[in-house]
Image (cartoon, grey):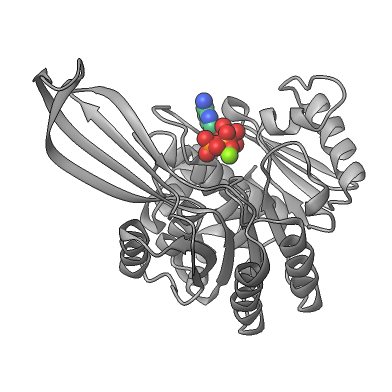
Amino acid sequence: MKDLRNGLVEFVTHGTEKCHVLVVGDVMLDQYYYGEVTRISPEAPVPITRVVKTKETLGGAANVAHNLALLGCQTDVAACIGADHHGGRLRALFDKRGIAIHGLVVTGAPTTTKLRVIGGHQQMMRLDFEETEPVVGEDEERVFMVAQASIAEGAGALVLSDYGKGIVTPQLCAQLIEAAHRRGIPVVVDPKGGDWEKYRGADYITPNLKELNTVQVAPVKNVDEDVERAARYAMNRFGIHAMVATRSECGLSLVTETTAVHIPTKAQEVFDVSGAGDTVIAAFALALAGGIAPERGAYLANLAASVVVAKVGTYAVSKEELLAALEREGKDES
Ligand SMILES: Nc1ncnc2c1ncn2[C@@H]1O[C@H](COP(=O)(O)OP(=O)(O)OP(=O)(O)O)[C@@H](O)[C@H]1O
Ligand SMILES: [Mg+2]
């Protein structure tokens, strides 16, 4: 593992600012309303929650962009939002993080938003605003145009973050994979669902174990040999060059046509794994954009995930936290 660390402190300290990554996918707004439950409503037998605090964060593909930006990377997004209040909030959050917003295409659908109401310590309700119809026609074309512009401007890697909300269509995937490869840049996909046909030609795919299972004929256990075999089967079946399979408490595996590297988790404490997959793909794509070897990128991604699983709620890792984790690892091994 010591070799995998080589050069990473230098890269995270000085190298990430020179990197440029494009994220295309289903961006979402995460909203949290925290309150205290005081009584039952006279209107209906439901608790009344007096809101005392609110929070808004970048979710889905937007969380991938958030991780990239916090790590110092020049980050572009190409995605759809609605002509609504939530779209404005999302735009403001991107802007605050220095993420380029000219790639946000406004469509007739609502901005995908998840609003949670938390009374005391208990989540009481979640309201989802979404329309998951595939983005087609003129909207799809506009997304492709903004993404293509970012590739032409020198993005060093393309992330396709599919949350199944409609933007990652077969046609857009095919066009973007082709455009990226014409420029010689890698495409990294976080898949959704069981049909990976649309990701054909991608360089890397980053399923979790459950997702990897959905494209197999027999169940996959969370052991090295099984994961490796399942990865190769899926790669062959869908024409994808390599895989970073995320394996929860077992860390992750990088499987290529000829090699497999299994990297155990570094997490000391685990509070909340939500968003860990977004951190993995962000850190991995960042490393590729920086010319770091994939094994080292996978090591960095796994380490970045160990930071976010120790935090409550969806959390994006910062440069300082990742550096601290790298230094801890260095001490453990010396
Ligand atoms: N219980 C755990 N203990 C230690 N590390 C973990 C744990 N769960 C997740 N991780 C770390 O986070 C990475 C991604 O986790 P996981 O395989 O659960 O992905 P995921 O299900 O896509 O995550 P997400 O909830 O973001 O969709 C793992 O590769 C590992 O590094
Ligand atoms: Mg995931």
| x, y percent for residue 24 | 59, 62
Relative to 296, residue 137 above or below: below
Quarter of the displayed picture in which ligand 1 can be seen: top right
| x, y percent for residue 49 | 14, 28
| x, y percent for residue 211 | 69, 33
Please state if 171 lies on the left or on the right of 235 as rendered: left
Please state if 41 lies on the left or on the right of 276 as rendered: left
Relative to 232, residue 190 above or below: below
Q: Can residue 280 be seen in this view?
A: yes
Q: Is residue 7 visible?
A: no
Image quarter of residue 149:
bottom right
Count numbered badges in the picture. Answer: 0
Please state if 273 lies on the left or on the right of 146 as rendered: left
Using the image as rendered, state which of residue 153 and residue 257 is in the foreground: 153
Q: In which quarter of the image is the N terminus?
A: top right
| x, y percent for residue 167 | 61, 57
Image quarter of residue 193:
top right
Rendered residue at 20%/25% (across/down): 119
Rendered residue at 71%/55% (across/down): 294
Using the image as rendered, state which of residue 43 and residue 22 is in the foreground: 43
Rendered residue at 45%/65% (across/down): 13
Residue lying furthest front in this view? 43
